Amino acid sequence: MHAETTSKKAVALAAFEGLPGEPGVPKPDPILVADGVVRRFGGLTAVDVAHLEVQRGSITALIGPNGAGKTTFFNQLTGFDTADAGSWTFNGNSLAGVPAHRVARSGMVRTFQLTKALTKLTVLENMRLGAQDQRGENFFRSLIPSLWRRQEDQITERAEELLERFKLDAKRDDFAGSLSGGQRKLLEMARALMVGPELVMLDEPMAGVNPALTQSLLGHVKGLRDEGMTVLFVEHDMDMVREISDWVVVMAMGNVIAEGPPDKIMSDSRVIDAYLGAHHDAPLSAEEAEEQLQEAEAELEIEEKA
Amino acid sequence: MRRAVIAITAFLGGLVLLLAAPAWADNEALKGTIQNQGKPVSGVKISVTSEDGQPVGQATTGSDGTWNVPVPKSGQYKVTLDQKTLPAGVTLKFKDRGTLSVQVYDGMQRNVLFALSSGSGGGDSGPSAESSYFERVAQLIFEGFNLGLIIALGAMGISLVFGTTGLTNFAHGELLTLGAMVAFLFNVSFGVPLIFAAVISVAVGALFGYAQDRWFWGRLRARGSSLLAMMIISIGLALFMRYLFLFLFGGESKAFLDYNAQPGIQVGPITAAPKNFIAMAIELAVLVLVSMALLKTRTGKAARAISDNPALAASSGINVDRVIRIIWTVGGATAALGGVMLGLAQNVGYQMGFQILLGMFAGVTLGGLGSAFGALVGSIVVGLFTQLSTLVIPTELKFSGSLVVLILVMLIRPQGILGRRERIG
Amino acid sequence: MDWNTIFVTTVKAAIGFETVVYALAAIGLNVQFGYAGLLNFGHAAFLGVAAYGLAVTVSTFHLPFWLGILIGLAATVVLALLLGIPTLRLRADYLAIVTIAAAEIVRNIFRSVAFKDIFGGSDGRQNFSGDFFALNPYGPGQYGIGPITFNERVLWVLTVGWVLVALSCALVYLLMKSPWGRVLKAIREDEDAVRSLGKNVFSYKMQALVLGGLIGCLGGFIFALGQASVQPDLFSTDFTFYAYTIVILGGAARVFSPVVGASIFWVLLVFIGNTLSEAVAAGVIPSSIMTVNQVGAVRFMLVGLGLMLLLIFRPQGIFGDKREIALDAR
Ligand SMILES: Nc1ncnc2c1ncn2[C@@H]1O[C@H](COP(=O)(O)OP(=O)(O)OP(=O)(O)O)[C@@H](O)[C@H]1O
Ligand SMILES: [Mg+2]
C-alpha cells in the first residue's frame, strides 16, 4: 500500500516537474480547466479567476485567507451558483451553466464546508443515496421491488466496504444526526465516493476534526489519488496542505495569485503577504519544510504498520 | 415553556372579558341584494341607524351583491346606501332615495331594496368619457396608495420579524384584527372618541407584541425550536386568535362610531372623505418614522445588522434578544395601527386581518424577504396594483390579480425587488 | 344532556365521511410535507380543482361522469405544475406563500360572479353525482351495528372512500420503502446535499407535489360526491390548516398516521362540538357565556390551540419517533 502511495505520488509530482509557479500555468494533462470565472455579490467581486487548470491524478490544494472566494469558486464550478461570466470544462466537456446534479453525474463531486449529513437518514441510507443510476429511483419502477432489489444489494455491499474503510461500519444503522462532527466529515466524504467520481472536491475536509482523526482522513485523501481519482481540496491548515498536496493554488480576494509545489508556495512572498500576513510566526525554509514532510511521512508509516 | 402557553392563553382569555361586546339577538336583521341590470354589485356600503340617528351597524355587499345588518330589536330603522361606494357609472335610480326608513318586526329579516341605474342618470350631463376614465385612474391610484400604506404597516412588522428571527409569522394578520377590535371596543362599547381609542389600541398592540416575544416566541427560540415548527405554531396561533375574535365579536362586520358618514371632498380629480386623507397622512408619518428609526437609531442599525448576519451581530456585542423584543413591540404597534386604519376603510370584522395577510405577504415577498424597505415598496406596489387592476378585471377578483403578479415576479426575480440571494455551501 | 346522541355521532365520525375526505387530503399532504418537506399551504386548491373539475364537467357541460373524473385529475396535475415550476427552485418559504396565494386565487375564481355561469358563484354546483350513486350496489335501507347506522348512499360513499384510502396508503408504503422514497426524504433533510449526489431535486419535488396533489384530489372527489354538491368556501385556507394539524397529530412521515390523525381529529371535533352544543342547550353552560352559534368558533379555537400545543410538546405526533421526523421543535 505504501509503495503504491509513493509511486502514485511520484507520478503526480513528475507531472508538475519544472512547471513555473505562475498563476494559471498550463498542466500536462488537465482534468478541469476554468477560464474567466467571475462572480459578483453587489459591489463585491467574490471570484475572478482568469485561468486555472487542475492536473489529473493529483492532489491539488486550494488555499487562501477567509473570504478569498474559495467556496464561492467551488459553487460556480459545481453548478450550485450561477457565475456572472466564465467558462470551464471537465474532461473536455463544458460545464458552464450545467445544473449541480448533472455536474455530479459527470464525475465531479463536491463536499461542503458546513457538513451536510442527512441527519434523519441512517448512515447506510446516506451511503446508498450516493450511488448512481439506481433503478428504484424511478417513480414507476420503485413500485415493483423485484426490479431494484438486486441492485440495492450490490449498492449496500459497496457502501459497507466504504464504511469499513472509513471506520464507520459500527455506526451503519445509526441516524447520521447522532454522529460526531468528524464522523460526519468522514461520512460525507464516503458518500461522495459512492457517486464514483473522477474529481473529488473537498471544502475544508479537516475543519473541526480532531488530530487523531485527521491522520486517518489524510490517509483517505491520499488513498483517493492512489485509486486514480483527482482531488481538489480547500484547507486552512498549512501542515496538512504541505503533507498531502502535490500542487497548491493560492487565492486572495477572488483571484488566483500564485501556484506551485507546496514547499515553494510557503516561501513565496506574494503568498506570505496575502495569506500568512504579518502573523505567520514560523517562516519556513525549504529544508525545514522538507524535514517536516519527512517527519509526517514517517509518522504515517508507523501508523499504517500498526 | 408550559408557562409561555399559559401566559398567552391567559392574555387572550382576558380579552374575552374585555371584548364582551353587546350581544345581538340572532333574529331581527335588515338585508338585501344590490343589483344593477340583473348583475350583483359588490363593495357597496350600507349603514343602518336607529330612528334617532344612533348607528346600529354597517355592511358592505359581497361578490353576490348581498348585505345583511343584524339589528338589536324590532322597530323603525334608517338604511343608507353610501353612494360614493357605487362603481363608476352606476348611480341610484332615484337620487333622493339613498336613505330609506323601514320597520322591522319581531323575528323578521326585512328585505330592503335600492334601485340602481347605469349611466349618469337623466338631467345632469356627466363629464366626458375620457376625463372620467382619467379621473377613475387617479381615484384608483389614490385608493391604491391608501391600501398600500395600510398593508405596509403590517408588512413592516412581518418583514422585520422575519429578518431578525427567520420566522414567517402567519399570525401577524390577527395583530391587525386585534388592533381594530381594541379600538372598536373602546370606541363603540365605551364611547371613547376614535382617536383616543386608536392610541389605546396601538399601546395594546405594542404590549401584545412585547408579551408575545417575551413569553412565547422568545421562549421557543431559546429552546431551539426549528423555524418550520414555529411557522406552523404561528398558524395555530392565527387560527386560535381568529376564532376567538369570531367568538367575541360575532361574524358580521361593524363600523366604528366616528367618521362614518363623512361627505366626500374633491381634491383635483380625487373624491374622498377627509378621514382618508388624514389616515394616509398618519400612516405615512408612522412609516417614515419607523424607517428613520431603522436608519438612524442604534437599535435600528442593530436590527439591520442582525438581519444581515445574526451570528456576527451577536458576537460583535449586539444584544440580539433585546433588539428582537423591540422589533416585536414596534411590529405589534404598527400592526394595531394598520388594523384601526383598515377598520376605518372597510369596517371591523374577525377575518379582516387574515384577509389582508396575503396582501402583506405579497408585499414582503415582492420587496424581498427580510428587507424592511423592500416590504414598504412591495406593499405600495401591491396596493396600487390591487386597485388599478379593477380597470380590467372584476372588483371581486382584485386581490387575486395582485397575487398573480406576486407569482409572476417570483418567476423573474425570485429574490424580490430589493432582496438578496442567500449563500450556499 | 343527550349522551347517547353524542356517543353515536362521535363513533360515526371516526369512520365517517369527513374523516375519509381529510384522511385522503392528509395522505397527500404527508407525501408533500412529511416526506419531501414541501410547504404546500394551498392543498385545499388541489381538492377544489378536482371537485370542481368533476362538478362543472357534469353539471355545467352535461358531459359524462367519468370524463369529469379525468378532468378533475388533469386539473390537479396542471395546478401542481403551475405552482411547482415557479417555486420549487426557490426557498421553502416562498413555496408556502405562493401556494397559499394560489389557493385563494382559485377559490375566488370559483366564487366570483364573473364566472357564475361556469362555477355557480358562492352557491357552487349540484346535480353531478347521479351516475356515481347509480353504481351503488347497496339497496335502500339502513346498514350498521346497533345504533351506529348509515343509509345506503352514505355507505356507498364510505366504501369507495375507504378503498381509496387503503390504496393510497399502500402506494405510499411501497414508495417510501424504495430508493425513490429515500431520495425524497433526503431532499427534506438537505436538498443541496442531494443535488451534490447527482439527483435531480427539482424533478423529485415536482413528482412529490403531483403525487400528493393527486391523492388529495381523490379526497376532493369524495368531498363533492358525498355532499352531492360543491361550494367554493369548502376549499378555504383553513381546510389546508386542518390537514396540517391532522398530519402532525398522527406524526409526519408515517404511512398510516394521516388516517389515524384524521380519525382522531374528527372524533375530537365532533365530540367537543356536540358536547358543547348539548351543554348550551341544556343550560349547563349559561347563554351569557356561549350561545349555540358560538360553538363552531370554540371548536376551531381548540384546533388552533391543539396545533400549537402539539408542535410545542409533541412535534413527532402521537405515534411518531422524535428522531425520525422533520419537525424539530425540541
Ligand atoms: N451569497 C452571498 N451573498 C453575498 N456575499 C457573499 C455570498 N457568498 C459569499 N459572499 C462573499 O464572497 C466572499 C467570498 O466568500 P467565500 O465563502 O467564497 O470565501 P472562502 O474563501 O470560502 O472563505 P473561508 O475560508 O472563510 O471559507 C466573501 O466576502 C463573502 O462574504
Ligand atoms: Mg469557504
Image: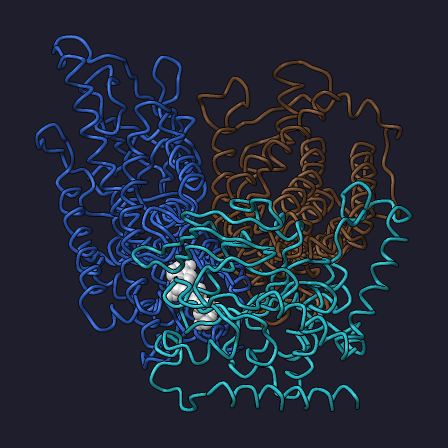
- Left or right: A107 as drawn, with respect to B391: right
Asked if C183 appears above or below B18 in the picture, the reply is above
Tell me, what hue is chain B? blue
Q: Can residue B15 be spotted in the picture?
A: no
Q: Quadrant of the C terminus of chain C?
A: bottom right
Q: Residue at x 36, y 43 (%)?
A: B253
Q: How many numbered marks are there?
A: 0
Q: Position of residue B335 (x, y in %)?
A: 31, 57
* Protein image colouring: by chain
Displayed quadrant of residue C137: top right
| Percent of width and height locating residue A99 | 57, 47
The answer to whether C83 is drawn above or below residue C169 in the figure is: above
Indicate the quadrant of ligand 1 in the picture: bottom left
- Residue A69 drawn at (x, y percent): 43, 64
Q: Residue A210 in the image: x percent, y percent?
A: 61, 86
Query: From what the image shows, is residue B161 above or below residue B374?
Result: below
- Which quadrant holds residue C264? bottom right
> Is any atom of residue C306 visible in this view?
yes
**Residue A44, placed above or below residue B356:** below
Q: Is residue C288 left or right of residue A191?
A: left
Q: Residue at x 52, y 81 (%)?
A: A237
> Furthest residue to the top?
B122
Q: Which quarter of the rendered picture does the N terminus of chain C lie within?
A: bottom right
- Along the viewing direction, whichever of A121 and A115 lies nearer the viewer: A115
Q: Colour of chain A?
A: cyan
Q: Colour of chain C?
A: brown
Q: Nearer the viewer, residue A226 or C322?
A: A226
Horizontal side of residue B42 vs A164, given as left or right: left
